[in-house]
Amino acid sequence: MQSHKNLTMDQVKVIEIKKSVFEDNDRAADELRGELKKRGVYLLNLMSAPGSGKTTTLIQTINRLKDKIRIAVMEADIDSDVDAVKIKEATGVSSIQLHTGGMCHLDAEMTRQGLDNVDMNGADLVILENVGNLVCPAEFDTGAVRNAMILSVPEGHDKPLKYPLMFSVCDVVVINKIDVMPYFDFDLDKCKEYIRMRNPKATVIPVCAKTGEGIDAFADWLIHEVHTWQNTN
Amino acid sequence: MQSHKNLTMDQVKVIEIKKSVFEDNDRAADELRGELKKRGVYLLNLMSAPGSGKTTTLIQTINRLKDKIRIAVMEADIDSDVDAVKIKEATGVSSIQLHTGGMCHLDAEMTRQGLDNVDMNGADLVILENVGNLVCPAEFDTGAVRNAMILSVPEGHDKPLKYPLMFSVCDVVVINKIDVMPYFDFDLDKCKEYIRMRNPKATVIPVCAKTGEGIDAFADWLIHEVHTWQNTN
């Protein structure tokens, strides 16, 4: 799989992702997951609406985990490389930018194109920050071990009613920007109730990525996930 | 074009939109626009990310305009009818809910399916509230006279860099939730600069839909648009 590579001023690798032609995405995703399992690499697919705070949450989480496990990040975006640069500058971990060329999601083959450009030697955890979109990314298995999503307080507690599939496919829902709860009509209990309507098993973790509040809980969830993935058959 | 119709408890009509098969969406959109022109109906396509405040902005705007022009609303959503009910309850104007059945956008033919269920007799303005998504809806001409979008302060001022097409295709960008500007790192000047990079002609209108601040400017823009559309050839 050929990808065009170049380096920005900040030396972040930018990969132009090609539209994949695989018809059976579920099979491609299962194959990718099998390969990752053999290599002991845990892939997390992180999704959210635009501006929910994926990158800030990742920076906080990575800074808590990077001395315990080896982490790499793939930042998917339609355009720009601001997120990959931010992650690299703020955490020092390996970070590449995937450009989707207008595409609204990543599937397993597109994820593989990204992984081909990640230094996976010794990596325990690769985090894919998906395109900011609550609709399309939910429809495509990327090959990740788990799907995580961030819902931010300003978006409103009714989002599980409006974007049911996204909440159904996510194993963990991080509720971000809880510091601004007093300024919005956001009912956390109602939000949790709506999430459980879509996915009774989902773990819900309220955080404020800006201050770091609650991030320990997400980091603990993640490192436990990685160790379990690496230590079971 | 057949659509399944039913009434909810609140007597809001819910239309299940079928995936359209038209290959040439641009042509279908131009045809629809031509028909609307003949009938003197102005169609506005309103887009945004999830939770940016489309419905609240519409309620405030409609309440300022409903005694001057005749308005109908089509609320598109993957699921739920909360928005159509809200609009009807808060403004009294005719409001129907379009269910996209998981689809991430509306094209011209899908918009037409909705319009077939709107009482257009005497309507001056029909507003389509598109699916909450900054990616896919930007790619499909719905047949609307103009595209409008809402960017809310909590999403961040960098969104025009990350979702270039959405900002390119919109004639007006409403910046909502300006009341919470003190709690977010949102640079309005930088945001305007980024919007103009994508679309030098875009009108930018800062508002707070919750309090109504700035809504007069958007309502003025809209009524001027409607009158111009109706009074020119």
Image: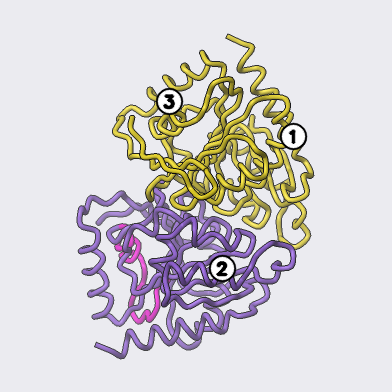
Chain colours: A purple, B yellow
SS class, disc 2 = helix
Q: Which sits in the foreground, B66 or B10?
A: B10
Q: Nearer the viewer, mark 3 or mark 2?
A: 2
Q: Amino acid at mark 1?
A: Arg
Task: Locate residue B209 relative to residue B105 in the image: left or right.
Answer: right
Residue under pointer 1: B64
**B162 shown above or below B147:** below
Chain letter for mark 2: A
> Residue at left 65%, top 38%?
B92
Same chain under badges 3 and 2? The reply is: no
Chain letter for mark 3: B
Q: Amino acid at mark 2?
A: Cys
Q: Please report whichever mark, 3 or 1, sits nearer to the chain's N-terminal start.
A: 3
Question: Mark 1 and mark 3 in contact (Cβ < 8 Å)?
Answer: no
Give neighbour class at mark 1: few <14, some 14-19, many 20+ (Cα, 10 Å). Answer: some
Q: Position of residue A136 (x, y in %)?
A: 39, 53
Give neighbour class at mark 3: few <14, some 14-19, many 20+ (Cα, 10 Å). Answer: many
Question: Mark 2 and mark 3 in contact (Cβ < 8 Å)?
Answer: no
Task: Please tell me in which quadrant of the rendered image residue A148 appears.
Answer: bottom left
> Residue at left 24%, top 59%?
A25
Q: Amino acid at mark 3?
A: Ala
**B20 shown above or below A195:** above
Same chain under badges 1 and 2? The reply is: no
Residue under pointer 3: B29
Residue under pointer 2: A191
Locate the N terminus of chain B by quadrant: top left
Q: Position of residue A140 (x, y in %)?
A: 33, 59
Q: In the orientation shown, which residue stands out farthest toward the top?
A: B233
Q: Which residues are magenta?
A: A110-128
Locate the C terminus of chain B by quadrant: top right
Q: Which sits in the foreground, B31 or A43?
A: B31
